[in-house]
Amino acid sequence: MEYKYFSRHGDPNIACRCGCGLSIEDMDRTFMTRIDVARQIANIPFIIISGIRCPAHNNNVSTTGFDGPHTTGQALDIFVRNSNERYIIRRVLIMLGFNRFGTAETFLHVDSSTDHPKNVEWLY
Ligand SMILES: [Zn+2]
């Protein structure tokens, strides 16, 4: 399966950072397809800083422990350079029905976990 804007080669940051081998191919395909559509509509680069994580790596880098949204392949952290990019990306994602966001100074987390509350925005 190919995405228009994301490829295994072009987006190594979607892979698990621990080197375990999980990659974009382990991302949830429905989630990634929706992100691909969002990227097209937003018409600005989506620079991914975190994607799939194995449980062990997630436990190392996140307070969500061994089973956070990133471990399901239904979560991404998207780098944002400024408030305008954050606004554009979030607006498109909301338009497409995403309803879980985490906001940090330099990135926007989005996920489509069904194991966690929807209609939430948290801060890091
Ligand atoms: Zn890993």
Image: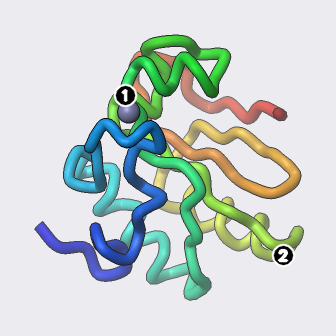
Q: Residue at x 48, y 50 (%)?
A: 97
Q: Quadrant of residue 21?
A: top left
On whether ligand 1 comes within 8 Å of the CB at mark 2, the answer is no
Name the residue: 65% across, 41% down. Answer: 101
Badge 1 density bin: few <14, some 14–19, many ≥20, Cα 10 Å: many
x and y, in percent, of residue 90 in the image: 67, 60
Looking at the rendered structure, the secondary structure element under dot 1 is: loop
Mark 2 Cα-neighbour bin, 10 Å: few <14, some 14–19, many ≥20 = few
The amino acid at mark 1 is: Cys
- Which quadrant of the figure shows ligand 1? top left
Which residue occupies the foreground of this view, 97 or 86?
86
Q: Mark 2–mark 1 contact, CB under 8 Å?
A: no
Residue 99 drawn at (x, y percent): 57, 40
Ligand 1: does it lie within 8 Å of the C-beta at label 1? yes
Marks 2 and 1, Cα distance to the nearest angstrom? 32 Å
Q: Is residue 62 above or below residue 17?
A: above
In which quadrant is the C terminus drawn? top right
Q: Which mark is residue 54?
A: 1
In this rendering, is residue 16 above or below 84? above
Rendered view: 107 above or below 84: above
Which residue, as the protein is rendered here, is positioned at the far front?
19
Q: Position of residue 86 (x, y in %)?
A: 77, 65
Q: Quadrant of residue 79?
A: bottom right
Q: Which residue is mark 2?
A: 84
**Quadrant into which the N terminus falls:** bottom left
**Which residue is painted at 41% across and 43% down in the image?**
16
| Residue 103, quarter of picture | top right
Query: Looking at the picture, which amino acid does disc 2 mark?
Result: Asn
Q: Give the residue drawn at x 46%, y 28%.
A: 69
Looking at the image, which is closer to me, 80 or 87? 80
Whole-percent x, y for residue 98 in the image? 51, 47
